[in-house]
Amino acid sequence: MNSNLACFGVGAIEYWAKMYKINIGTEELRWPVWVQDTFDVKDRVQRWLVLIILPISLALLSFRSLQAMVQIYRGERDMVIAGHEAEDLVTIHAWNLQ
């Protein structure tokens, strides 16, 4: 698969579609006992809940990426960084924090 398409979650969507078509169940996924008691739910996690997580997370990731791109375009932000890069920048510029 083209790596550019993978960036947009195409691989994840294909995986999700296969899970739906094959009808992979959630028999092994059970709610903790305290959730069952507190919210009066069935012991097994419903299939729709498992299948809806991926599209929602991809939508949130896309929204956050779009926010970062707009901030970079407007000059409100210099770059998009990962957590470990942030730690490195804090270490490098620790003297500014004191």
Image (cartoon, rainbow, N blue to C red):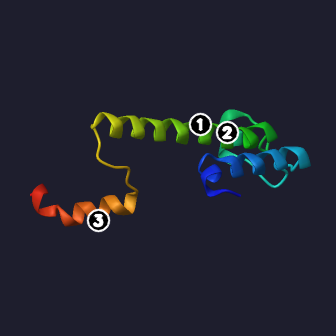
* Percent of width and height locating residue 33: 70, 48
Residue 73 visible in the current orientation: yes
- Of the image marks 1 and 3, the number of the one nearer the N terminus: 1
Cβ atoms at labels 1 and 3 below 8 Å apart: no
Q: Residues within 10 Å of mark 3 (few under 14, many from 20)?
A: few
Q: What residue is drawn where x is 41% and y is 39%?
A: 69
Pick the quarter of the image with the N terminus: bottom right
Q: Which residue is mark 3?
A: 88
Residue 32 visible in the current orientation: no
Between residue 41 and residue 77, name the one nearer to us.
77
Q: Which residue is mark 2?
A: 55
What whole-number distance in Å separates the C-alpha atoms at marks 2 and 3? 32 Å
* Percent of width and height locating residue 73: 34, 37
- Of the image marks 2 and 3, the number of the one nearer the N terminus: 2
- Dot 1 amino acid type: Ala
Q: What residue is drawn where x is 39% and y is 34%?
A: 70
What whole-number distance in Å separates the C-alpha atoms at marks 1 and 3? 29 Å
Q: What residue is drawn where x is 67% and y is 43%?
A: 54
Q: Quarter of the image holding residue 21?
A: top right
Above/below status of 55 relative to 26: above
Above/below status of 37 relative to 11: above
Q: Secondary structure at mark 2?
A: helix
Q: Which residue is mark 1?
A: 59
Cβ atoms at labels 1 and 2 below 8 Å apart: yes
* Percent of width and height locating residue 50: 74, 43
What whole-number distance in Å separates the C-alpha atoms at marks 1 and 2? 6 Å
- Dot 2 amino acid type: Pro
